[in-house]
Amino acid sequence: MVSDADRDAEEAITTLLTAERPDDGLLAEEGSEREASSGRRWVVDPLDGTTNFLYGLPAWAVSIALEDSHGTAVGVVLDPVRDELFTAVRGEGAWLGEERLAVSACESLDTALIATGFAYEAEQRGIQAEVLLRILPRLRDIRRAGSAALDLCSVAAGRVDGYYERGGQPWDWAAGTLIVTEAAGVTRDLPGEPLGLVATGAAIIDELEALVA
């Protein structure tokens, strides 16, 4: 689903970036795209969690990342409902406002609270349900908030112990993955199709990756 808010937010963000950084590239969820002459690219999700937004559920965010030749350099996720701003700069840590973030110290999947998301396509959702049946007995519990960007920020803040999902797009994960790694977490691509991601603290990344891959 796409709302007027998605389109309006993307227009506002891309207009500002074009004015301030005209040589940078751009990739945004609702179709805005341009090539870079600077070696940098902005990756924008103007409203991550559109279904929540349309249903009046308070879990949606704006996600913006800046990429360069070395990977993601800056990540910003704004949760307007809770007035929380998550930020990270490569090599400088991850922050929630003035508070420095760190992933949880969870050392076992048995005590891990894991976030995930589900695809829109019925066939892929069926596969994800089969995975869920396999892994749920191995975990403390599962949380499904409906915003990948906020899920990753929750990992960085230690609010959940990990996150996994298949079927995301670059704009879903670009900012959040940097925020996790700058909070001393680990992110890994899941092999196979569709594209997948897993993010946790270092102690349980291998075990969770093997369980969901």
Image (cartoon, rainbow, N blue to C red):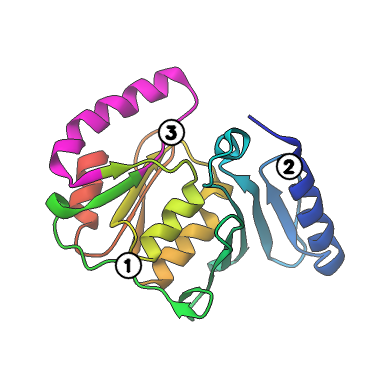
Circle 3 or circle 2, nearest the eye: 2
Q: Is residue 18 visible?
A: yes
Percent coordinates x, y for residue 80 in the rendering: 61, 57
| Predominant secondary structure, magenta span | helix
Question: On the picture, is 200 further left or further right than 106?
Answer: right
**Residue 175 at x, y = what percent?**
54, 59
Residue type, mark 3 in image: Pro
Looking at the image, residue 38 sits to the left or right of residue 173; the answer is right
Question: Is disc 1 placed on a helix, strand or loop?
Answer: loop
Q: Which residue is mark 3?
A: 194
The residue depicted at 45 percent of the width and 60 percent of the height is: 153
Q: Which mark is residue 189?
A: none
In the image, residue 97 sits, relative to residue 10, either above or below, namely below
Which span of residues is magenta-colored?
A: 116-141
Q: CA distance from mark 1 to mark 2?
A: 32 Å
C-alpha span from label 3 to label 1: 26 Å
Residue with the mark numbered 1: 103
Residue reaching furthest to the top: 123
- In this rendering, the label closer to the viewer, 1 or 2: 2
Q: Secondary structure at mark 3?
A: loop
Residue beneath disc 2: 5
Q: Earlier in the sequence, mark 3 or mark 1?
A: 1
Question: Would you say 42 lies left or right of 181 here?
Answer: right
Assess whether residue 125 is covered by the magenta stretch.
yes
Residue situated in front as seen by the camera: 5 or 165 = 5
Q: Quadrant of residue 142?
A: top left
Give the Cα distance between marks 3 and 2.
27 Å
Q: Quadrant of residue 38?
A: bottom right
